[in-house]
Image: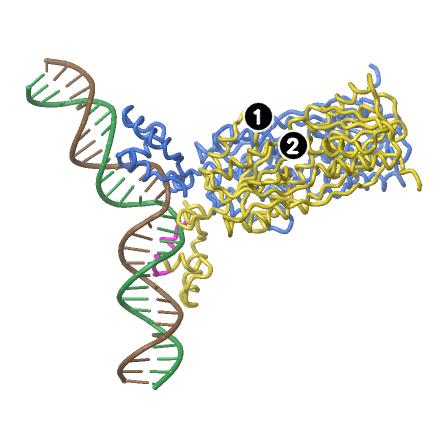
Chain colours: A yellow, B blue, C brown, D green
DNA sequence: ATATATTTTGCAACCGGTTGCAAAATGTGA
DNA sequence: TCACATTTTGCAACCGGTTGCAAAATATAT
């Protein structure tokens, strides 16, 4: 079906190597030869088989894009940025949806069978060991939105979740709340653990303020809503730092259902600053996570690592900042 | 780096073909041989190179997953379903993000270079000719969420958008609205055109009811909001059939900002029934598009077409139905 | 013009697998 | 046990490219 190198060579009356060389940049080909070959190729509608060439060059330009976040709208933004960024550099994302049923080893094996040049793991809800499994398989790995360990085994690009926890706490303190709470995502996620730790460490500086904690089942609307409905039945804080934006939106819906007002009765601060947080009917005060920068830096780091496979692992941490909208009461003056 | 067939063969003391055969199901290998080879393979950590084998088998098990909808949350659900469904069948999605800058030919060429076995085009906002470009390149194509033409060139799986338009119109009529409007997505999208046509054709049956039309720039929150803010300044219908759910949510936000109430002052009906439509703070009455069925049927059709490349093109159309929630006033009694 | 340096080209082996074919091994029946 | 049918195995060619090397062609210097 497809036109091959050999056919082009025959039609142009040259050797197969000559054809190969005209399509390999940096190879030595005379102008005359190049013209002859290009003409034949055009006439036949030839374009080289990337997979066949990968066999000798050892490069497929395939990048595994691995995630388990197919229910959090912010990841649509993430996939958009990753796919665009990768294809702009001639790399092709092979998408892997990690479900609970499938063990990591399967994905690792599969991606190796397809000889991916590298793997981007985009998730904050996977154990660090997961990204390491790829590295152990000898594949360059960038863990985006991962936890930055003090002795990193793989490249990590993301934010300082501990600091985000502190930042949220400071924000609530500054606004004079006397009874605050952490309403985290799934307890097993490193991002949840770190945000929790940061939040608590900052609150420890303010012993007069009451602090409580709980965790939702997932970073999802429904989980946030359920957890908040449960909380509203018993205890109730003045302000909540929620695991992320989508969780916050679930929390908001629970609050509104209970005939309470935000921010008058309860304050909410989220994390991520996803598109939806900006929607006028949501208008969520939140901590901005610079996903554009994280994604583009992840891609740059991946490209650099492809050229230098033994590159020393590094962590790239981007600062976050509070985006004030309408779900926290104003800061108290002076 | 990676272990090859040859190394396994040497270690097991057998021919390379023997090793190949143990990893090809349906091939003739004795039990004794199989055990020997598997032992050696295990010890070496061998797994076959899918790309190399594709060279002779002509099958890569790669499927191009092409879309331009990276801003509509429903497509996160679509990607989730597609990636899961494909990988369950041993197929690998190569994700392509079609941006406006990139011409279709580029994507076609790229996917051919990677010898994808087939292409799924998942979009309702691409011209039908686009999917055809892949077919002309000799690649099996399934156009999911596409328009079903009377003389289809490629497989199409989706809904009858014209019928959906009629259904929305009937619903508004049944509820006694006397002044209704169509607020569509981008006018160039076939889905918009068809929903519009259906809506108008049904309304033509009810000459006493006033009808107006307008179109938002995109299927997005912001576009819906802007268009509705504009409309509220001048004319104003009693009920709107909006292009899709995300558009509807933008419309809702504009309405609430204008101190009007839904469904008391204005009724809204959307289309898609995405997860968010169910959220209690949105609670959108909408037309359910059965995306699970569309996706799984698309995958089945793709698999069938891989086994039978000259399969006659077909259209698979799934029925939609109204999901009543809180944004239309109740139907008037008998 | 010739000798020498430089560039361009083709040959042939290789990348990591698969597969048709014939030889070798094994199974079956008498 | 032998003749014959059946299964298993290895050889070698092939899939569609790339690349080191040496020969051929061209350029440069004398």
Q: In this view, does B177 lie to the left or right of B160?
A: right
Tag shown at residue A100: 1
For the point 49% across and 33% down, the residue is B91
On the image, the x and y values in percent for residue B143 come to 57, 36
Determine which quarter of the picture holds residue A330. top right
On the image, the x and y values in percent for residue A50 come to 45, 48
Q: Mark 2 points at which residue?
A: A190
Depth check: A274 or B160 in front?
A274
The prevailing secondary structure element of the residues shown in magenta is helix
Q: Mark 2 lies on which chain?
A: A
On the image, the x and y values in percent for residue D18 come to 40, 54
Depth check: A181 or B24 in front?
A181
The N terminus of chain B lies in quadrant:
top left
Determine which quarter of the picture holds residue B128. top right
Q: Which of marks 1 and 2 is nearer the N terminus?
A: 1
On the image, the x and y values in percent for residue A261 come to 88, 27
Assign a secondary structure to mark 1. Answer: loop
């Amino acid at each position: 079906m497809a036109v091959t190198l050999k056919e082009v060579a025959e039609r142009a009356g040259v050797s197969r190597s000559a054809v190969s060389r005209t399509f390999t940049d940096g190879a030595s080909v005379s102008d005359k030869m190049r013209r002859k070959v290009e003409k034949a190729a055009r006439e036949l509608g030839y374009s080289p088989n990337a997979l066949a060439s990968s066999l000798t060059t050892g490069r497929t330009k395939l990048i595994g894009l691995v995630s388990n976040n197919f229910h959090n709208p912010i990841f649509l933004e993430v996939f958009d940025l990753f796919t665009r960024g990768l294809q702009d550099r001639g790399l092709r994302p092979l998408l892997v949806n990690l479900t609970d049923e499938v063990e990591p080893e399967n994905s690792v094996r599969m991606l190796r069978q397809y000889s991916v040049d590298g793997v981007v793991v985009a998730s904050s809800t996977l154990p660090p060991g997961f990204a390491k499994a790829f590295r152990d398989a000898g594949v360059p790995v960038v863990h985006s939105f991962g936890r930055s360990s003090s002795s990193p085994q793989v490249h990590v690009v993301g934010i300082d979740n501990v600091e985000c926890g502190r930042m949220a706490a400071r924000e609530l303190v500054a606004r004079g709340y006397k009874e605050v709470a952490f309403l985290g995502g799934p307890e097993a996620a490193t991002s949840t653990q770190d945000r929790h730790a940061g939040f608590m460490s900052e609150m420890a500086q303010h012993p007069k303020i009451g602090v409580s904690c709980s965790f939702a089942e997932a970073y999802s609307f429904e989980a946030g809503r359920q957890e908040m409905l449960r909380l509203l039945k018993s205890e109730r804080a003045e302000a909540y730092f929620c695991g992320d934006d989508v969780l916050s939106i679930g929390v908001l819906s629970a609050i509104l259902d209970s005939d309470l007002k935000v921010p008058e009765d309860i304050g909410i601060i989220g994390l991520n600053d996803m598109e939806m947080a900006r929607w006028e009917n949501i208008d969520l005060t939140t901590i901005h996570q610079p996903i554009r920068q994280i994604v583009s830096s992840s891609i740059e780091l991946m490209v650099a690592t492809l050229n230098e496979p033994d590159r020393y692992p590094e962590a790239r941490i981007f600062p976050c900042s509070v985006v004030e909208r309408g779900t926290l009461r104003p800061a108290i003056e002076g």
